[in-house]
Image (spheres, helix red, strand yellow):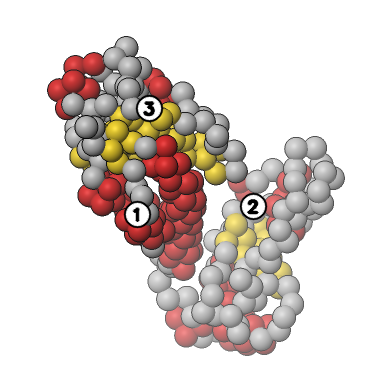
Amino acid sequence: MDQQLDLADDAALAQVALEVTSSLRLGDVLRAVTAGLVSTLGVEAAYLWLGSSAAPRGLELAARAGLDPGGPDPPDALARLTAPDEHLCTNDIPHDGSSGSPEWLDANGLRAVAGYPLTFRGVRLGVLGIFSRRRLTTLAFRRLFLFAQQAAVAVQNALLFTEVETLRERLSAENAYLRSEPGGDRSPEAIVGVSPAMHEVLRLVEQVASAESTVLLEGETGTGKEVIATAIHQQSRRAGRVMVKLNCGAISPHLLESELFGQRRRSRRGMGTRPRLPISGTSPTPCGPRPRSRKGWLSCRPGAE
């Protein structure tokens, strides 16, 4: 009499589902799916392929447990599973190569295969394939189908968490870069000058640093406008935050205003709404059509984020 895997007691499958949903790390989720099916349910092999544009069939092997699959690509019958209601469930695996090479199937004594697409809101994330030497009952196929739906949600959550972590790391790196000051200490105390004119400049720095208003610094190139702007920022209420500098010379004069202050939606072809972000400083430049007698100017808002 043939042995059957009927999953009559679904407590084991529920335990696997709990382990799958208990982590947001993609690697942990994938391993919990495949290893749990093999170790807890007793199937001979479980494979999970995730979508990949670089893979020949659009799927790459992301996790496996049990038997060596013999290759990274999914069998044709599994690769074709795309819709949420599609599945492959049979206790008589055809030896035509569509569900695995006949040699591999015979060498491992496999007779049952269950394949389910992992979909989330109509988008295929991957495919789950399960191979067993024992026959699977109709109830087992149904419960594995429900498990695949739970696994799809867990995989989607893990993918989103990975994306958020990547963006967070990138933001942290950019924040660290913006906070770095290769010019060293530019506090007013570090500005060297004993002349009456320099004392007057430092007095004005202290005066405007506490004001919530825009400051315009004018002067020839190389006279230290950025140094003074940094000194104003460091004495402002937001000195502990990032001072964003923008090289106006690298921006087209026609796009400078929208780059600094934003653009209304569809007000200019090809441009969407941009956030109106205050800036703490800009590099010395003859900015756009606005004529000036001096070679450079710099506008800053003290303590802006």
- Closer mark to the observer between disc 3 and disc 1: 1
Task: Tell me how far mark 3 sits from mark 1, CA to CA.
Answer: 21 Å
Question: Is there any visible trace of residue 154 in the rendered image?
Answer: yes
The residue tagged 1 is 9
Rendered view: 117 above or below 38: above
Q: Nearer the viewer, residue 179 or 128?
A: 128
Image x and y of residue 107, in percent: 15, 23
**Left or right: 267, with 171 as reference point:** right
Task: Tell me how far mark 3 sits from mark 2, CA to CA.
Answer: 66 Å
Q: What element carries label 1?
A: loop
Hey, what amino acid is under mark 3?
Thr
Question: Which numbered disc flags the more N-terminal residue, 3 or 2?
Answer: 3
Number of residues whose C-alpha sits closer than 10 Å to that of mark 1, classed few (under 14), some (14–19) or many (20 or more): few
The residue tagged 2 is 248
**Left or right: 174, with 31 as reference point:** right
Rendered view: 140 above or below 108: below
Q: Which residue lies furthest to the top in this view?
A: 96
Question: Is there any visible trace of residue 54 in the rendered image?
Answer: no
